[in-house]
Amino acid sequence: MFKAEMKKLTLQFGFFALVVALFSPSVVALTELSASVRDQYILKLKPEYDADNSEVEVMKNEFTFVLGTSLDGSWVQVINRDGRSGWIPVTMLDLQRVDQEDYDDFYFALMRERRYLSRISWEGGASFGTTPFGVGAETMLRVNLFKEGFATNKSDQLELGAGFRYHLGASPSPTFNGTTLVSDSAKRFFEVPVELSWMFRLGYRGNLLVGPHFGVSFVKDPFARFNPAMPAVAGFNFRYYPRDSFGIYFHTWVHLRSVIYYSASSGVTWRF
């Protein structure tokens, strides 16, 4: 009798999952069922016995989360707490309801596993800084050195970036030449920054990136005693991606010289 009820439950669930897949293709829908694995098993890539094995192995009595079933209800797609998923025969599982806390944990694991990963990102926008920078424009190209994550799985990025900034300049403070105050005119100049950024991905989708950056900048500052100069640069980067590829950014940084200069920039970013 238990087997008959189990088969009925899996068939009903399979029909529900099919309806969701047909009418909500862009929405990730999770069930409220968990499953305890009856015996050690290597998950399949497809709901077939002769399908290739995945790289995911579940252990006896391991607690997994149900994502869906095959059309005939004989296979179940499950995800473990590491966010890795695959297919397993329904006869290998004991199904049960899941509580809200475990539901949230598995949902976060699923979203982390499905996060958009990119190797290269490009930025372009406007900048503003204290004297002598003023208003300007910038472009930056960044390379994600560890696509799957540097210190944590798909939760951070270590990036090496380089770019070009063109500044219209801002007039320095007037100086006293002994008789009168003298004010130099603003002068245009450029700089080439090279940065190492450590970005942390926040939120379920990981679409908010926040982190520090450090580096140096080749600056053609017309008011510097030594020209060109290569001051150290440090600051914070903020990026938000409402779409997988397109986003906006806001960056702050300081040039560490005998006098500290403050600057910020904002614009759009694409990642590939």
Image (cartoon, rainbow, N blue to C red):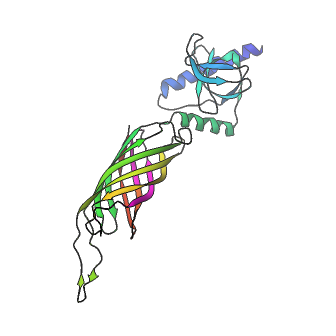
x, y percent for residue 204: 54, 41
x, y percent for residue 199: 48, 48
x, y percent for residue 115: 50, 36
Indicate the quadrant where residue 174 lies: bottom left
Outermost residue to the front: 226
What residue span does the magenta drawing correspond to?
Answer: 224-250
Outermost residue to the top: 50
> Of residues 11 and 157, which is closer to you in this image?
157
Up the image or down, 237 lies above or below 182; here it is above
Q: Is residue 44 magenta?
A: no
User: Which image quadrant: the C terminus?
Assistant: top left
Q: Is residue 233 magenta?
A: yes
Residue placed at 65% from the left, 31% from the top?
32
The answer to whether 100 appears left or right of 71 in the picture is right
x, y percent for residue 217: 35, 57
Residue placed at 73% from the left, 23% from the top?
60
Up the image or down, 95 lies above or below 49; here it is below
Indicate the quadrant where residue 39 lies: top right
Number of numbered labels in the structure image: 0
Up the image or down, 160 lies above or below 99; here it is below
Residue placed at 32% from the left, 69% from the top?
131
> Of residues 163 and 129, which is closer to you in this image?
163
